[in-house]
Image: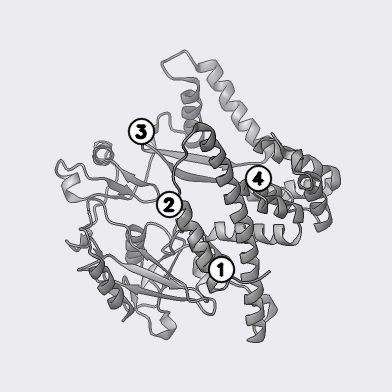
Amino acid sequence: MIALGETDVAALQRVVSSLRDLGSASTESEAVERISLLEAIKAGCAAAQAVETMRLEELRVESESAAGVPKARQGRGLAAEVALARKASGSAGGRYLGFARAVMREMPHTRAALAAGVLTEWRATILVRETAHLTPHDRGEIDRRLCADVSVLEGVGDRALDAEVKRIAYELDPQAVVDRHAQAAKDRRVSTRPAPDGMVRLSALLPLVSGISVYASLKKHADATVGADDRTHAQVMADALVERVTGAATVDALPVAVNLVVPDDVLLGDSTAATHVSGYGPIPAATARAIVATSLDADAATTLRRLYKAPSSGALVAMDSTERLFPTGLKHFFDLRDESCRIPYCDAPIAEYDHADPHARGGDTSAANGGGMCLAHNRAKQNPGWRMTTADHTDTTRHTATVTTPTGHSHVSRAPAPPGHHDEPVSLIERQLRALLDAA
C-alpha cells in the first residue's frame, strides 16, 4: 500500500472533474451501460477508500508509537476522523473503520471483487457484517466460497445474500451463531426517527420470539376489528400499539411533553414559516398552532419561554455563566440552538455539553464556548491533536464551530437557522472576511 502523493491527489481530482463534465448518453442502451459502469466505479472507489483508510491507521500507529503513546491508547479518535473525511456521522465512521479492517485483512476475495466493480459496497458490507462474529479462518472460508468466483453471486438479491452468509456461518460454527444471538438480545431497544409529513417512525429491536409475538398480537387484533369503522388494517394495528403501550384509548389523550420553537408571528399571527420540534425537526406553521391550541384546550401544563435572536444573522442570544458545569438553562438553550451534535455531518442526539476551549485552559462556561455533543464525538475531541474553536459574531452570523483533526484538516458547522429566519445572500468577499475574523 502507498500513500497518495500530490500528483495522485491531483489525478483523483481530475477524475472527479471528468465525471462532472461527462456528456449524457445518446441512446437508451448507452445510458444503461453507463449506469452499470458508474456503479462499478463506485465499487472500485470503495475498495480504494478502504486501502487509504488502513494506510491512515498504519501511519497513525507509527507516529504515535514513535511519540511514546501506549499501545492501548493508539488510534483513539481515528474513527471520528474517518467519519469527517467521508462526511458521515461518528457511529458510521466506526462501522466503516471496522469494514475496512475486515476487507483489507481477512477477506481478500471480497476486496478483489469490490475493486473489480463486480460487488457493490453495500453487498460487501453485508458479507462483513454477517461474519463479524466468526474466527478469521471461518470468515475467510465464507469469503472464499462466495467471492472467489463472483459468478456465484450473479442474480442473488441482498436478502438472499444475507441469508446465505448466515446459513454458511451456522454450518461452520453453530456455537458462535448461538452466542451472537444471546449477545444481541442485550441490545434490545426502542428508538424514534422523524418521518415525512408530521409522522414519527417508532422502531423496536427485539429478540426473535418477542418481536414476532408483538406483531402477531397486533395483527390478530386488527383481523378481528377491521370493518367495524373506516380504519384500514394497518391503521388499526398502529392504534392498538399506541393504546396497549400507553393505556390511552386515543392519541389525543396521551400526556406529551413537546419543545416547540415557534416565531412570534407564527404563534400570534398568520405567518406560514416553518417551526421546529426538538428531537423531530421542522413542522408547518398550521400544525404548530394546532399543537398549541390543543394543549390549551385540554388544560395541559404549558410553559412559554422567550428566545431572542439577532435580526440579521438569526443567531440566538443567551447568557454567560462562571460555573464549571453548564447550568440547566444553558443546556436547554444548547438543545434549542444546536438541535443535534455540533460536529459536522453528525446528527446524533445531544448527550453531553462541553467547552470548545477546555475549562482547564481558561475556557468560559458560556453559550459562545459551549455546545451540545454526542458521546462518541465528545470523547474523540479529547484526544491529542484535536482542537475545537467557536465563533459567535451574533450580529453577522450564527454560532459556528470548527473542529481540526490531527492531520490538520478543518471542518466547520454552523448552528441551524431558527424557525422563520432566512439568511441574506452573502458575497464571497464577506465570507472570506468572516473566516479571517473567526481565525483571528
The answer to the question of whether label 1 and label 4 lie on touching residues, with beta carbons closer than 8 A, is no
Find numbered disc 3 in the image and state the secondary structure of the residue it sits on: helix
| Residue wearing tag 4 | 123
Find numbered disc 1 in the image and state the secondary structure of the residue it sits on: helix
| Residue wearing tag 3 | 252
What number is the disc on residue 8? 1
The answer to the question of whether label 4 and label 3 lie on touching residues, with beta carbons closer than 8 A, is no
Identify the amino acid type marked 3: Asp
What number is the disc on residue 21? 2
Query: Mark 3: few, some, or many residues within 10 Å (few <14, many ≥20)?
Result: few
Total marks in image: 4
Q: Residue at x 31, y 82 (%)?
A: 440
Query: Mark 2: few, some, or many residues within 10 Å (few <14, many ≥20)?
Result: few
Q: CA distance from mark 4 to mark 2?
A: 29 Å
Occupied quadrant, residue 357? bottom left
Find numbered disc 2 in the image and state the secondary structure of the residue it sits on: loop
Q: Is residue 348 visible?
A: no
Looking at the rendered image, the disc whose residue lies closer to the viewer, 3 or 1, is 1
Estimate the x, y position of residue 48 in percent, counting from the top left. 62, 60
Residue nearest the observer in this picture, 68 or 121 = 121
Looking at the rendered image, the disc whose residue lies closer to the viewer, 4 or 2, is 2
Residue nearest the observer in this picture, 15 or 417 = 15
Sequence-earlier tag: 2 or 1:
1
Q: CA distance from mark 3 to mark 1?
A: 61 Å
Q: CA distance from mark 4 to mark 3?
A: 44 Å
Quadrant position of the N terminus in the picture: bottom right
On screen, 188 above or below 29? below
Identify the amino acid type marked 4: Arg
Q: CA distance from mark 2 to mark 1?
A: 20 Å
